[in-house]
Image (spheres, rainbow, N blue to C red):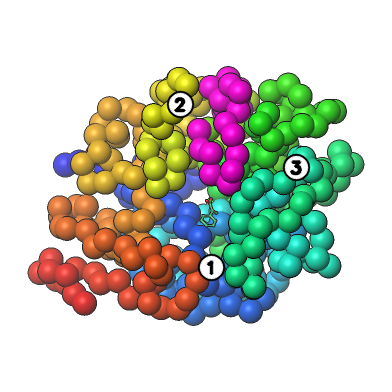
Amino acid sequence: MTPLFDPIQVGDLELPNRIVMAPLTRNRAVAGLKPGALQVEYYRQRASAGLIISEATQISPMGQGYLDTPGIYDSAQVAAWKQVTDAVHAVGGRIFVQLWHVGRISHSSLLPDAAAPVSSTDRRPNVQTFAAEGFVDVSAPRALRDEEIPALIEDYRHAARCAREAGFDGVEVHAANNYLLEQFLRDSVNDRTGPYGGSIFNRARLVVEIMQAIAAEIGAGRTGIRISPMTTFNDTARDSDPQALFEHLVARLDPLGLAYVHVIQGETGGPRYPDDAERPFDYAALKACFDGPWMLNNGYGPEDAPQALAAGEADLIAFGRPFISNPDLVRRLREGAPLTPPNPETFYGGGAEGYTDYPTLDADGAVES
Ligand code: 8OZ
């Protein structure tokens, strides 16, 4: 048997397999930035995953950066997400919510009182986002003052509390893809002085304080984190020393006893080891900094996912696009069945098409349409 189907203890949860549904932004939230009936069906269909990680979900109104992404900070959102978690649990699944703050990857039209996005810096990246009026350049950000950081940490803690009230089994903190938390981590963005800028220790401080606050609120065994040491997504240069930065961060998180660390290798949708890397990132050395379950992501499939587990490179593999178009991905991997390819035209926004209408195998293992 492939190691994909060995059970594993992940924090407070026992997972029946190593197949995780990666967080996937789909821009289909209903009015009030809530999940609706479609999301209930979408996540229920995918509940055979060892663990579902929800689409990125903002911790506060200021955390939003794209049209129709859901939030988890008010009581209506909690009630709506409860429908999703109940549906997943009813068919035996487990689901974490990914807690997200976009930082400077936003547009004022998406923010309360047309505010400027907030970041570690006031420098604007050359990137577009999708707002009500279509694709627009992101707005110039405002650097958060140090005195504003405690309220930001409180927003994360509050969202984690809301997540548990909504029935989520835990949370994954989105510290990847050059959104707010990575805007503090990287010296290519963070140009602050003071306690949250300068040294690696200081740049990691915000993430560490957020993880401590959430772990204190809901338990470390229900708290994971996602990082992406090498991605240049969102027009962001790499840190001057990603290996040192991320080894420091993971080593400092290790004593908290988190449920897992989730690493995007390379660029989402691109190579795991980008050719232009000055030195290839040493993911094994990063893993050695952490005692708990280690999750890898980016383009894994039926052949290389079990290989990575067998080689000890990972304990869990997160699958993104394969889960979009194969709600029964777990069964297909178990049976060696062919995978349906996803349609990128329906990734972001829209309705049921390309969302809840992908086929599953029938009882004989044939693809039903
Ligand atoms: C695609 C489009 C918008 C957001 C990420 C949350 O990259 C995202 C995202 C992906 O982490």
Q: Which mark is residue 27?
A: 1
Which residue matches tag 3? 123
Quadrant of the rendering where the N terminus is positioned:
top left
Residue 17 image position (x, y, % from top left): 31, 48
- Amino acid under label 1? Asn
Work out how far the residue at label 3 is from the one at label 1, CA to CA, in angstroms.
Answer: 26 Å
Work out how far the residue at label 2 is from the one at label 1, CA to CA, in angstroms.
Answer: 32 Å
At x 57% / y 72%, what residue is drawn? 29
Helix, strand or loop at mark 3: loop
On whether residue 234 falls in the magenta region, the answer is yes
Residue 232 image position (x, y, % from top left): 53, 39
Q: Is mark 1 within 8 Å of ligand 1?
A: yes
Q: Is residue 323 something that shows in the picture?
A: yes
Which residue matches tag 2? 277
The earlier-in-sequence mark between 3 and 1 is 1
- Which residue is the extreme one toward the right? 147
- Amino acid under label 2? Ala
Residue 306 image position (x, y, % from top left): 25, 39
At x 40% / y 60%, what residue is drawn? 93
Residue 285 image position (x, y, % from top left): 45, 20
At x 45% / y 78%, what residue is drawn? 351
- The residue range painted magenta reads 230-250
The earlier-in-sequence mark between 2 and 1 is 1
